[in-house]
Amino acid sequence: MITGGTMASKIKLLRHNKVKERPEEGTPEFDAWIRDYAKRTADFYLDETREVPELDPDTRFLCGSWDFLTQTDKKREAEDNAMEKAEDQRRRSKLKILK
């Protein structure tokens, strides 16, 4: 509700998705935080024990999440069909019905 040009109450986030706030740059806390973040990230990407799905030999690049790579063909096809249906509905919503 707006009263007198100002907001009566401050908008609150429904879901706070940041696990840890980032410290101010140039502080010792920031240096420790960035070292820890870099180590966790490197450990994730360089972990040789993690199971990687087999890719087609013609694959030239890799993008997307791990969930997408491990999806079954059936699940991926269902998702593609849903996206196509949504696109069709979006196109049809712009058409005008003449009687």
Image (cartoon, helix red, strand yellow):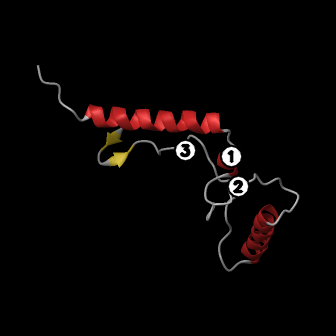
Nearer the viewer's eye, disc 3 or disc 1? 1
Q: Which residue is mark 2?
A: 55
Q: Residues within 10 Å of mark 1 (few under 14, many from 20)?
A: few
Which of the 4 image quarters holds residue 23?
bottom right
Which of the 4 image quarters holds residue 34?
bottom right
Mark 3 vs 1, N-terminal side: 3
Q: How many marks?
A: 3
Mark 2 vs 3, N-terminal side: 3
Q: Residues within 10 Å of mark 2 (few under 14, many from 20)?
A: few
Residue in front for this viewpoint, 86 or 20: 86
Residue in front for this viewpoint, 52 or 23: 52
Amino acid tagged 2: Leu
Q: Residue at x 45, y 42 (%)?
A: 9
Q: Residue at x 71, y 45 (%)?
A: 70
Q: Are marks 3 and 1 in contact (CB under 8 Å)?
A: no
Residue in front for this viewpoint, 36 or 9: 36
Q: Residue at x 46, y 38 (%)?
A: 83
Tell me if 77 is positioned left or right of 56 in this view.
left
Q: CA distance from mark 2 to mark 3?
A: 40 Å
Judged from the image, the secondary structure of the residue bearing numbered disc 2 is loop
Q: Is residue 1 above or below residue 23?
A: above
Residue 13, disc? 3
Image quarter in which the C terminus is found: top left
Amino acid tagged 1: Asp
Give residue 41's position: percent from left, percent from top. Answer: 76, 65
Judged from the image, the secondary structure of the residue bearing numbered disc 1 is helix
